[in-house]
Image: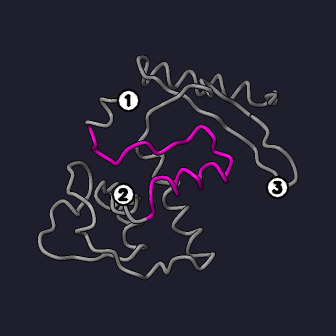
Amino acid sequence: MEKLIVGKSLEHQLDTVIKELAPAGNISYAVLQFDDEEEPTLIAARGENTVHSSASLIKVLIMEYVFHLARTEQLDINDTVPLSRTPRVEGGGALQELVGKHSFTYLELCRLMMVLSDNIATNLLITVLGMENINARAEKLGMDEMELNRMMMDFNALAEG
């Protein structure tokens, strides 16, 4: 993929900001122009082939998969899932504060996962959708480098690589 000349200026500006605000950071970015009829055009990039461990990025894929299943009538977004289907974990979110028996719709879980970065909501969706199904969806979308390998806040799996 060849970069557009206009992207050189954008790259320079972004690199300047990164050097100023996060000089020790391991930061990558890619700015692409999409056209339905053609391959994406790379505008600007830095470390675009670097592999990062990123929990929150996978949440976008999980949400996309939920909405794909709803669009194709394989799932009703208003069906509920009991909170008891997944273990409690720490981290961001509101569900760790709840006690008792609660159920949430798929839509509510997506909202909690995206708006509050709720790790329990994310793990609950991973549990009911299936990690292998989420990874298959990434592959179908052409996201060959994106892979869900563990639940949120699973430090044992993280330590094992």
Residue behind mark 2: 122
Q: Earlier in the sequence, mark 3 or mark 1?
A: 3
Determine crowd level at label 2: few under 14, some 14-19, many 20+ residues with C-alpha closer than 10 A: many
Look at the picture and state if 76 lies above or below 38: below
Quarter of the N terminus within the rendering: top right
Q: Kindly identify the amino acid type of the residue bearing the numbered disc 2.
A: Thr
Q: Are marks 1 and 2 in contact (CB under 8 Å)?
A: no
Residue in the foreground of this view, choosing between 116 and 71: 71
Spatial CA distance of label 1 from label 2 is 20 Å
Tag 3: residue type?
Asp
Question: In front of the other: label 3 or label 1?
Answer: 1
Q: Earlier in the sequence, mark 1 or mark 2?
A: 2
Q: Dot 1, how many residues are within 10 Å of its Cα: few (below 14), some (14-19), or many (20+)? A: few
Range of residues picked out in magenta: 129-155
The percent coordinates of residue 108 (x first, y second) are 37, 72
Q: Which secondary structure lies at badge 3?
A: loop
Q: Position of residue 5 (x, y in %)?
A: 81, 27
Q: Is 158 in front, or is 17?
A: 158
Q: CA distance from mark 2 to mark 3?
A: 31 Å
